[in-house]
Amino acid sequence: MREALDNSMIPSPLPNTFAGLMEVYEGNYIKIRKLCDNINPNVGQYLSVSTADLDLHMQITERSRYTYTLILSYRFNKDDTSMPADYPKLTVRVYHDAMQAEVLPTNLKGSDSRTQFENKRLLHRWRDNRFLSKWLSFLLRRGHSFD
């Protein structure tokens, strides 16, 4: 007779690894689904107003059967020149079939070897997606929601 698998026996993926990144992607998907109140938004602009935080702007820029791409940002006064009008501004691809969400990477440039470049790219993705994870948790605690 087989024993049930005890989840406490499965070690958590290490930070800055591919497996760890996949776990962050899964967590981001769950949080985005909560933020969007488990709806599948159409292309367009959305606004979440919270009394405890700044207004949160979401723009769905692309939608297909299994994915959509969104941009999340706060919008600041354009008269304040110390920071961009939209900040932070993250472009996120949501994969319904894989149940993952990732920050789309920006172009990395450099003259490193292929291995060094891949390591930098992994660390860059890890940093960006960990930031998204923390920000989404913050937004949910502050009562943000797109209905």
Image (cartoon, helix red, strand yellow):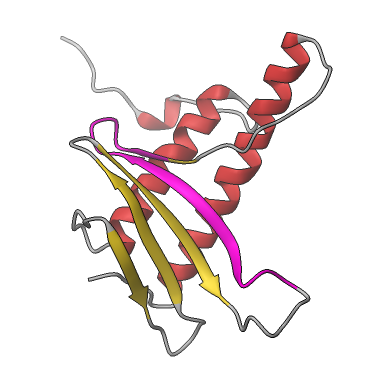
Between 46 and 10, which is closer to the camera in this rendering? 46
Which picture quadrant has residue 100?
Answer: top left
The answer to whether residue 41 is magenta is no
Q: How many marks?
A: 0
User: Which residue shows up at 51% across the image and 82% down it?
Assistant: 54
User: Which residue shows up at 65% across the image and 42% down it?
Assistant: 127
**Residue lying farthest to the bottom in this orientation:** 51
Which picture quadrant has residue 110?
Answer: top right
Q: Where does residue 101 sit, x and y in percent of width and height?
A: 40, 41
State whether the magenta stretch is mostly helix, strand or loop: strand
In the rendered view, would you say 15 is above or below 46? above
Magenta extent: 83-101
Which picture quadrant has residue 119?
Answer: top right
Between 129 and 16, which is closer to the camera in this rendering? 129
The answer to whether residue 100 is magenta is yes
Quadrant showing the C terminus: bottom left
Residue 6 located left or right of residue 24: left
User: Which residue shows up at 61% across the image and 84% down it?
Assistant: 77
Q: Where does residue 21 sit, x and y in percent of width and height?
A: 53, 32
Between 44 and 125, which is closer to the camera in this rendering? 44
Between 47 and 138, which is closer to the camera in this rendering? 47
Residue 128 located left or right of residue 97: right
Q: Where does residue 63 sit, x and y in percent of width and height?
A: 26, 44
Quadrant showing the N terminus: top left
In the rendered view, would you say 72 is above or below 107? below
Residue 37 located left or right of residue 87: left
Q: Where does residue 47 sit, x and y in percent of width and height?
A: 35, 75
In the rendered view, would you say 54 is above or below 139? below
